[in-house]
Image (cartoon, helix red, strand yellow):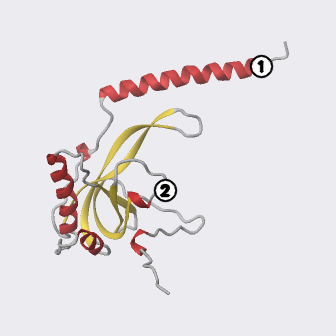
Amino acid sequence: MSSLPFNLNTTTTTRAKGEKVEYITPGAHHCKITGLTTSENLENYKGSPFIQYAVKSDSGKVGRCRFWVVKETDKQSTREWKTKQIKDFLINAGVKDFSDDSKAMNDAIHKDLMIAFISEEYISINKENQEPVIRTATQYRWSAKVGGKCTYNNDMNKTLTDEQMAEFSKKHAEWSKANNAMQTTSEDEDMPF
């Protein structure tokens, strides 16, 4: 009988019921890499492929560092940028051998490094009522070796542009108009006359 590997680096565990998880906030944090997964492990994922590291800060907060995979359709400059992003991260985590990409990526697990996270606003839809909303995601920006300089400033955070705010306002006004019309109709139907 042959056995298969566990693939523990791509296995996630669930929290105990009621256990609260705190997520990393924008800033520079000393973190330990706790796991690795890829977009291939996600059911029904149809977006751009990525590699994602789970990290935990010294304060116990969790986060993720996502790196987009190089695609055949990428421009040369994009390919170089994507490769540099993940290689810098791995070097800062103490990885030295890059002769095998998979091994190098797995060698980063349980390593420490400094990571700067930023916030980025984006427009989304509330799944319960379809209302357009502005959300904020905390994202990996860059890293440094432990003890190295890992700069973070509030002005690195990304807010919606004026054009995006105008788009959001338009969508929200349309939703409000349609939603108010539906509420009025249902209230009128309950009237006794």
Which residue occupies 24% across, 45% down? 73
Q: Is residue 163 above or below residue 43?
A: above
Which residue occupies 19% across, 57% down? 83
Which residue occupies 39% across, 47% down? 47
**Is 152 left, or right, of 3 in this rendering?**
left
Q: Quadrant of residue 122?
A: top left
Mark linked to residue 50? none
Query: Pointer 1: what residue?
Result: 189
**Is 164 left, or right, of 182 in this rendering?**
left
Say whether marks 1 and 2 touch (CB < 8 Å).
Answer: no
Quadrant in the picture for the C terminus: top right
Query: Pointer 2: what residue?
Result: 43
* Residue 29: image location, x then y, percent: 28, 62
Which residue occupies 43% across, 61% down? 41
* Residue 151: image location, x then y, percent: 19, 55
Amino acid type, residue under disc 2 in the picture? Glu
- How many residues crowd mark 1 within 10 Å: few (<14), some (14–19), many (20+)? few
Between marks 1 and 2 in the image, the one whose residue lies nearer the viewer: 2
The number of callouts visible is 2
- How many residues crowd mark 2 within 10 Å: few (<14), some (14–19), many (20+)? few
Amino acid type, residue under disc 1 in the picture? Glu
Viewer-nearest residue: 139 or 85: 85
Task: Name the residue at the front extreme.
Answer: 1
Q: Quadrant of residue 90?
A: bottom left
Q: CA distance from mark 1 to mark 2?
A: 43 Å
Q: Is residue 155 above or below residue 32?
A: above
Q: Earlier in the sequence, mark 1 or mark 2?
A: 2
Helix, strand or loop at mark 1: helix
* Residue 58: image location, x then y, percent: 34, 69
Helix, strand or loop at mark 2: loop
Viewer-nearest residue: 146 or 34: 34
